[in-house]
């Protein structure tokens, strides 16, 4: 009995952490800093902040990414206490917490101009540019098609020309196949990301600056070009996406395959993994080309780049006891040396206009950022649709072929209905 | 006639078991082989023997996954949890199995009834409860939840065991004037020793492999258990197979070691419940 | 006189003292959540704002949701593997009880999946079952190329692989040990009598072995239902993630998605209430079984 009662306080004490010091500790919850290039970059930036601000100490907590992360944040919100700074994905996932994050306008005033107003608007309450800003954007996330120039040349295709029409794109695929090269390296095990990401490009290509209106009154149903996009997808799936790849995992195997030169094209993302940096390092800086999308629409949307104005960003939570210190940390990540360090090490695209892209030494980045951009459709969808259902519908329609294209379009339309109901 | 029949049956059985054993063991062999391959080699050579052995995957898992700390955490939490678990299972098992009191059967059946519910059903509410009781981020809270979730089964096993203990033992202990807890510790525990070893092992394995509740209740990075930390390594983008295999083998290490040493007790324990009690 | 009385009194309370900690824990951490869940299914709550009472709306939405009916169908398919998961260990055990050389080795190998836990087994099986994974590689090496399919990327193959691996394969080892122990308590004289009558193996199996361990068989069936309905989540999560599409999306998975991905807690509770009904039915069977044996 005594043993038990002795154990209880011991265990209880072991669970709690006490800290009392004159230095302000800023706790950050982050789902990127746990591993990989992000970890290295953030450690550097944190060290820089602590060096420049001796009264600030940073406690950077790595949380698991994925579904659990927002569960934890919700738990903290319910408890009314938690970290000072929380990392969010831009868009609906951040807006849900608007009531619990501080408005940042006064903290960002001094360096506001370094980031475009469009990005700030996206990071405001509910995405409404007229309302206060609640989040500092760190990266912009986009999607596009990486190409292996050497393999394109081998099949007799001009590696620097972006195909002007879908027919041209398919003709290129045919030529690659005839030359014995896998046209597109894809991966569907664990998630049909190849299909998912290409659709985001398609949607940007079709709707251009009207993507945001999909959440209001613009539909998928009845749009002939959307149907055409689905049919192109089907054709790519049956003929031109590497067959063996159906069982590889997108984020590891498929990307690795492309980096190893096993295919001419890769539907990729401009995030911190499987990105231009990884591929340039593997295939050679001059050997990696990029198409922002597959073009098949009117001229104003040609070569449009789908970009989320904020991929990930930081917000200060309303219960924070050190908002000023936290704001300094945010400033160090959002401006100054921080963005450059982050971009250089991870390859994620930053939003700070002052960050010197050319000094990174990868010409392709400048090329990507110079284009017109459109919103990513998943930024307007509900959590469940964006993170789970859309992928499942893509699998049903294009990987397993369980449902027809019309059924797929109906399901996509239902996602829009959900998005509209949630507003 | 019987002999030939028997022999063919035996041959079929050996073949069948052989295949089963192969199928059961091959994934482990595969995991080990993959975990010592470099990720680069794995891209091209997924299934064969590694041409170059490397322990990098393990050091990556160990360092980046902060394995040592989490091992320590787990080594702290599990024994503490086991103390509560054993206390409850043995006491309740003895009461239900050997003592006679009104309401014994209905209460026992309700315990069994509550054994069924899946973690998914319970998680959301359990979190709310722990929050109001200030048990989040607290090993004590996690232990209570673990014990609540795992002890019905342990109690059931102890009950079936104790019901086979002769009543005379209990009677004579009482006549000797023993008080309740004296009887419990001096007599009941020693008698049930083999079974207690069994439920200790079962309890350890359950707690070691448990994930949903630890994820929910332990939010401080420092407090994680080792199984929990593996979930963290995965991240949104998944993990390269070689590293994943190394991580899995690290997490599986303790259950496997326990199993190899206590094989007999573990497999004996599985059937208590099969025999009518 | 006085001493004897108080002794009698404490004796009366003893059992209750012993079981009280357990009962309190169960009431707080299992009974209350179950009931709270049912109550929550009549509300709308996203985890941050205040819950809002909406009556039967969650249920109306659920019955219209094709994901719901799909998940019921998937759960049903998994349940269909239970007979095989009962018969196979039975037959194997019956033969094994005749004695087998090297049994400890086989026992260890068969039981291994159990101790690794579902999360680990799910991850390993996920890699093994891929189109370019070890399973297909072995099939190809054996010359069975046309059997080497894409197990995880075809809806019907995925759900059936899940059913077979989870419902039959993973539990074979445990089942054998379980039934072997049960059979070990059968009276040998019954077998001797059967032998004298010249009964063949099958006859003995059906007339002697099976009836003698009836309780164990019934218990195993109930256990199987519990495993499929209420314990499969970790395995499905790591094995197929509910996919491809919605092919292995079960009730448990739906609760997870609605509750922890969509954060529609009330809606998730409605699904959970349906699962509760299924679990309760099984629990009643289990309780009836135990009651019968206890008498």
Image (cartoon, helix red, strand yellow):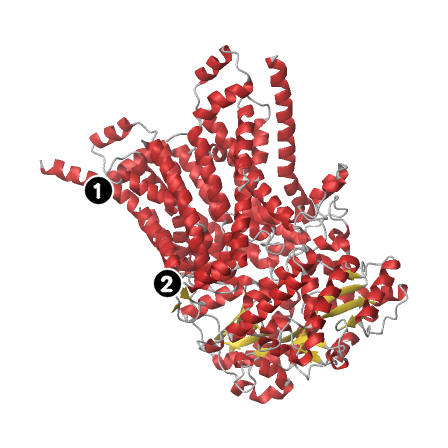
Q: Say above or below: A291 vs B187.
A: below
Decide: few, some or many residues near mark 1? Use Cα within 10 Å; few <14, some 14-19, many ≥20.
few
Q: Find numbered disc 1 in the image and state the secondary structure of the residue it sits on.
A: helix
In the image, is residue A242 above or below residue C128?
A: below
| Image-quadrant location for residue B133 | bottom left
Q: Position of residue C84 (x, y in %)?
A: 55, 35
Pointer 2 chain = B
Which residue sits furthest front?
A222
Decide: is B95 above or below A217: above
Q: Quadrant of the N terminus of chain C?
A: top left
Can you tell which quarter of the image residue A39 is in? bottom right
Q: Position of residue B243 (x, y in %)?
A: 65, 53
Q: Quadrant of residue C213?
A: top left
Rendered-image quadrant of the C terminus of chain C: top left
Mark-to-mark CA distance, 1 and 2:
32 Å
Q: Chain of mark 1?
A: C
The circle drawn on residue B134 is 2
- Residue C229 numbered tag: none
- According to the picture, the residue beneath numbered tag 1 turns out to be C13
Residue, far top = C196
**Residue lying at 37% horizontally and 44% vertically, measured from the top left:** B113
């Amino acid at each position: 009995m005594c043993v038990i009662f002795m154990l209880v306080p011991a265990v209880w004490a072991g669970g709690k952490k006490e800290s009392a010091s004159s230095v302000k500790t800023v706790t950050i919850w982050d789902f990127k800093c746990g591993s990989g290039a992000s970890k290295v970059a953030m450690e550097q930036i944190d060290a820089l902040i602590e060096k420049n601000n001796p009264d600030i100490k940073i406690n950077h907590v790595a949380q698991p990414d994925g579904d659990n992360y927002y569960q934890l944040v919700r738990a903290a919100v319910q408890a009314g206490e938690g970290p000072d700074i929380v990392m969010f994905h831009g868009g609906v996932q951040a807006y849900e917490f608007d009531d619990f994050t501080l408005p940042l306008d006064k903290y960002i005033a001094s360096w506001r101009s370094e980031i475009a107003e469009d990005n700030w608007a996206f990071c405001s309450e509910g995405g409404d540019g007229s309302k206060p800003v609640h989040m500092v954007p760190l990266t912009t996330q986009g999607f596009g098609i990486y190409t292996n120039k050497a393999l394109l040349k081998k099949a007799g295709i001009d590696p620097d020309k972006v195909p002007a029409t879908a027919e041209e794109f398919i003709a290129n695929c045919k030529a690659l196949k005839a030359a014995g090269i896998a046209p597109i390296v894809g991966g569907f095990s664990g998630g049909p990301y190849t299909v998912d990401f290409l659709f985001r490009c398609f949607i940007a290509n079709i709707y251009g600056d009207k993507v945001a209106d999909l959440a209001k009154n613009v539909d998928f149903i009845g749009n002939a070009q959307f149907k055409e996009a689905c049919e192109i997808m089907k054709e790519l799936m049956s003929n031109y996406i590497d067959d063996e790849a159906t069982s590889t995992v997108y984020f590891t195997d498929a990307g690795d395959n492309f980096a190893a030169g096993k295919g001419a094209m890769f539907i990729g993302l401009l995030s911190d993994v499987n990105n231009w940096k990884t591929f340039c390092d593997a295939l050679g800086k001059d050997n990696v080309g990029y198409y922002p999308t597959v073009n098949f629409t009117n001229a104003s949307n040609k070569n449009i780049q789908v970009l989320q104005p904020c991929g990930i960003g930081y917000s200060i939570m309303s219960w924070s006891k050190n908002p000023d210190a936290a704001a300094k940390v945010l400033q160090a990540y959002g401006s100054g040396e921080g963005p450059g360090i982050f971009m250089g090490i991870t390859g994620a695209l930053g939003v700070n206009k002052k960050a010197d892209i050319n000094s990174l030494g990868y010409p392709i980045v400048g090329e990507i950022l110079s284009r017109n951009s459109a919103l990513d459709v998943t930024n307007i969808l509900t959590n469940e649709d964006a993170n789970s259902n859309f992928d499942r519908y893509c699998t049903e329609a294009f990987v397993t072929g369980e449902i027809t294209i019309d059924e797929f379009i109906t399901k996509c339309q239902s996602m829009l209905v959900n998005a509209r109901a949630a507003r | 006639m019987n002999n030939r029949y028997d022999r063919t049956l035996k041959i079929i059985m050996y073949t069948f078991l052989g295949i089963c054993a192969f199928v059961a063991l091959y994934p482990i062999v595969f995991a080990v082989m993959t975990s010592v391959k470099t990720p680069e080699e794995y891209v091209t050579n997924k299934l064969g023997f590694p041409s170059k052995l490397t322990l990098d995957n393990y050091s990556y898992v160990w360092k980046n996954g902060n394995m040592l700390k989490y091992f320590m955490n787990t080594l702290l939490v599990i024994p503490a949890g086991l103390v509560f678990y054993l206390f409850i299972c043995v006491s309740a098992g003895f009461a239900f199995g050997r003592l006679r009191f009104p309401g014994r059967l209905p209460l026992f059946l309700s315990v069994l009834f509550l054994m069924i519910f899946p973690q998914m059903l319970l998680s959301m509410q359990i979190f709310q409860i722990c929050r109001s009781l200030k048990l989040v981020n607290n090993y004590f809270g996690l232990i209570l939840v673990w014990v609540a979730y795992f002890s019905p089964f342990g109690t059931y096993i102890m009950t079936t065991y104790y019901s086979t203990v002769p009543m005379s033992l209990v009677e004579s202990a009482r006549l000797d004037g023993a008080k309740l807890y004296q009887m419990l510790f001096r007599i009941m525990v020693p008698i049930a020793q083999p079974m207690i070893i069994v439920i200790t092992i079962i309890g350890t394995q359950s707690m070691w492999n448990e994930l949903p509740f630890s994820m929910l209740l332990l939010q401080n990075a420092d407090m994680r258990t080792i199984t929990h930390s593996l979930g963290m390594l995965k991240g949104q983008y998944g993990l390269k197979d070689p590293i994943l295999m190394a991580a899995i083998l690290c997490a599986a290490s303790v259950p496997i070691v326990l199993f190899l040493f206590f094989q007999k007790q573990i497999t004996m324990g599985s059937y208590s419940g099969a025999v009518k009690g | 006189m006085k001493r004897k009385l108080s002794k009698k009194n404490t004796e009366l309370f003893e059992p209750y003292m012993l079981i009280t900690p357990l009962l309190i824990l169960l009431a707080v951490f299992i009974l209350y959540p179950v009931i709270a869940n049912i109550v929550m299914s009549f509300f709308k709550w996203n985890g941050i704002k205040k819950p809002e009472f909406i009556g039967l709306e969650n249920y109306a939405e659920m019955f219209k949701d094709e994901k719901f009916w799909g998940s019921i169908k998937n759960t049903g398919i998994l349940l269909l593997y239970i007979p095989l998961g009962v018969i196979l260990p039975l037959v194997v055990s019956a033969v094994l009880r005749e004695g087998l050389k090297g049994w400890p080795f086989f026992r260890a190998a068969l039981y291994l999946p159990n101790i690794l836990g579902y999360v680990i087994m799910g991850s390993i099986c996920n890699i093994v079952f891929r189109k370019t994974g070890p399973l297909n590689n072995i099939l190809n090496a054996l010359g069975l190329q046309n059997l080497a399919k894409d197990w995880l990327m075809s809806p019907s193959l995925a759900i059936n692989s899940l059913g077979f691996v989870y419902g039959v394969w993973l539990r074979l080892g445990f089942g054998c040990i379980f039934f072997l122990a049960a059979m070990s308590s059968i009276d040998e004289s019954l077998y001797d009598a059967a032998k004298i009558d010249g009964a063949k193996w099958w006859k003995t199996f059906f007339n002697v072995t099976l009836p003698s361990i009836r309780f164990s068989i019934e218990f195993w069936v109930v256990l199987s239902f519990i495993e499929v309905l209420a314990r499969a989540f970790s395995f499905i999560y790591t094995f197929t993630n509910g996919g491809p599409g919605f092919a292995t999306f079960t009730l448990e998975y739906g609760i997870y998605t609605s509750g922890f991905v969509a954060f529609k807690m009330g809606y998730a509770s409605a699904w959970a209430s349906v699962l509760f009904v299924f679990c309760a039915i099984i629990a009643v069977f289990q309780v009836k079984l135990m009651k019968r044996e206890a008498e």
